[in-house]
Amino acid sequence: MRIKLGKKVWCTVVSLLVLLAVWEAAVLVGSFPEVLFPSPISVWNAFWQLWTDGLSGSSSRVVLGVHILVSLKRFAAGYASSVVTAVAAGLLLGWFSRVFSYVNPIVQLIRPVAPVAWMPFIVLWFGIGDAPAVAIIFLAGFFPVLLSTVAAVEHMEPVYRKVARNFGLSQAQTLYKVVFPAAFPQIMNSLRLALGTAWIFLVSGEMVGAQSGLGFLIMDAKNCLRSDALLATMITIGVIGLLLDWGIRRLEKFVL
């Protein structure tokens, strides 16, 4: 295990060093102005400025740590609510397949619509602030988890239902003690996919109608013509997304 972990760390370090070298070489060889293509050192300096003093030239001098906490708070509220609602609804609809046959056309009609397309209605209904971003995250995470949970229940081995009936379990007990554990591995795969999608749309949701958060900071850096701060924020978003994916994979192993 230690050898595998050490190999993963080594591969990660090497890949990042290669990326930084290629980035720096492109800056030195190319004739791009600094405002359009900042160097790694410039991005690091911008990151440190964002972390300590906030974005210079902005009307909001909130530091990066506060933006991260605000975004994580919105993400936790939207993602947790979507997962709980989607798993519960998926278990019921997968168990009562006849009901799902009527619900499925409506789901398939709404699912392809990008969550950001709902933004005008969400802003009108909820106003500006945390609610629009939370609603966007909820929509982004709900449908993948719902459909995967329904599919996992529908394709569950029939022997599990027979065993539940033999033990005299009620439908509620069967769903909680038999169906949910049997469908759990497939549900966890959908949770990982939904997590990445929800994190992407968090940034989109914060770009409109929010006065804080990483998405707002991206728009703020763009308006201030600070491409170095823009890249620093983008890298921060990527690192946090990577850590969230690592965390949910660890949670899956722990529960399994």
Image (cartoon, rainbow, N blue to C red):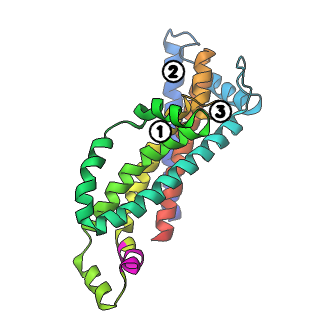
Q: Is residue 168 left or right of residue 233?
A: left
Q: Which residue corresponds to the image point at 55% horizontal and 9% vertical from the top-left? A: 33
Circle 3 sits on which residue? 212
Q: Nearer the viewer, residue 252 or 87?
A: 87
Q: Is residue 234 above or below residue 243?
A: above
Q: Nearer the viewer, mark 1 or mark 3?
A: 3
Circle 1 sits on which residue? 200
Residue 207's spot in the image, x, y percent?
54, 28
- For the C terminus, which image quadrant? bottom left
Residue 248's spot in the image, x, y percent?
50, 57
Residue 60's spot in the image, x, y percent?
72, 25
Q: CA distance from mark 2 to mark 1?
A: 29 Å
Residue 177 part of the magenta segment:
yes
The range drawn in magenta is: 171-179
Classify 10 Å Cα crowding around label 1: few (below 14), some (14-19), many (20 and above).
some
Residue 25 is marked as: 2
Q: Is residue 77 above or below residue 18?
A: below
Residue 157's spot in the image, x, y percent?
24, 75
Secondary structure of the residue carrying tag 3 is loop
Asked if the residue at tag 3 contacts the one at tag 2, i.e. Cβ–Cβ closer than 8 Å, the answer is: no
Q: Nearer the viewer, residue 73 or 134?
A: 134
